[in-house]
Image: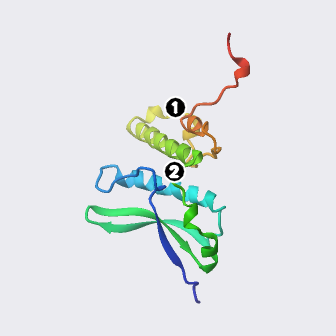
Amino acid sequence: MSYPRTIRIEVGPVPAEESCAQVGHEDYSERSRRECAVYIRQLQRIFDNPDPEDLRFVRCGFPHELGRYHEVVAVMTAEGAKRFDEAMLPMQWDHIARAELTWLELQGKWRATVMARPEALALVPDVFRSGQIPQFPNHPIAQWWAMGFTPVTTAYRLH
């Protein structure tokens, strides 16, 4: 069986203008894993959820003097290369990605709290009980939803 030739292009661990986890820091592994996963999801949105046979984004590890570092790599066939355009790579997180990063960080904190004190499970908001990242809108309000806040209509405001 012959496999199609692939092209691999490193696209960074996060959008170009965003700060990222630093190799050698205590929280590098966990933070890098979250950042790369969210960046992959953002890239899939940007490139209109391409067929993974043609174009996919994967987290890859590379050697570094302080240990391994991770980046997202675009892996594509010749067909996928027609869709991939480096000019489309984001400079910043979109609203969805910011919400996903917030949600993942808070879910991790809730998980650590429950591991330390199992009785705290009753305090965990429903939004953090699922292992699935919620579907956030590409709107600034997404960050609030990721923190567990629910928007309230102004029709019920008190005077």
How far from the left and from the top, in percent, is residue 97?
55, 48
How far from the left and from the top, in percent, is residue 110?
46, 38
Q: Residue at x 41, y 55 (%)?
A: 32
Closer to the camera, 81 or 28? 81
Query: In this rendering, is residue 84 above or below 128?
Result: below
Closer to the camera, 116 or 91? 91
User: Three-letter amino acid code at disc 1?
Assistant: Ala
Q: Residue at x 45, y 50 (%)?
A: 18
Q: Are marks 1 and 2 in contact (CB under 8 Å)?
A: no
- According to the picture, the residue beneath numbered tag 2 turns out to be 92
Q: Is residue 157 left or right of residue 113?
A: right
Closer to the camera, 140 or 108? 140
Give the CA distance from mark 1 to mark 2.
36 Å
Disc 1 is placed on an element classified as helix
Q: Residue at x 47, y 57 (%)?
A: 36
- According to the picture, the residue beneath numbered tag 1 turns out to be 122
User: Three-letter amino acid code at disc 2?
Assistant: Gln
Query: In this rendering, is residue 105 above or below 62?
Result: above
Instruction: Tell me if mark 2 has few (under 14), some (14-19) or many (20+) residues whose alpha carbon lies within 10 angstroms of its own.
Output: some
How far from the left and from the top, in percent, is residue 147?
53, 35
User: Quarter of the image holding residue 43?
Assistant: bottom right
Residue lying at the far right of the rendered structure: 155
Disc 2 is placed on an element classified as loop
Q: Quadrant of the N terminus?
A: bottom right
Q: Is residue 9 left or right of residue 155?
A: left
Q: Earlier in the sequence, mark 1 or mark 2?
A: 2
Closer to the camera, 11 or 150? 11
Q: Residue at x 65, y 62 (%)?
A: 49
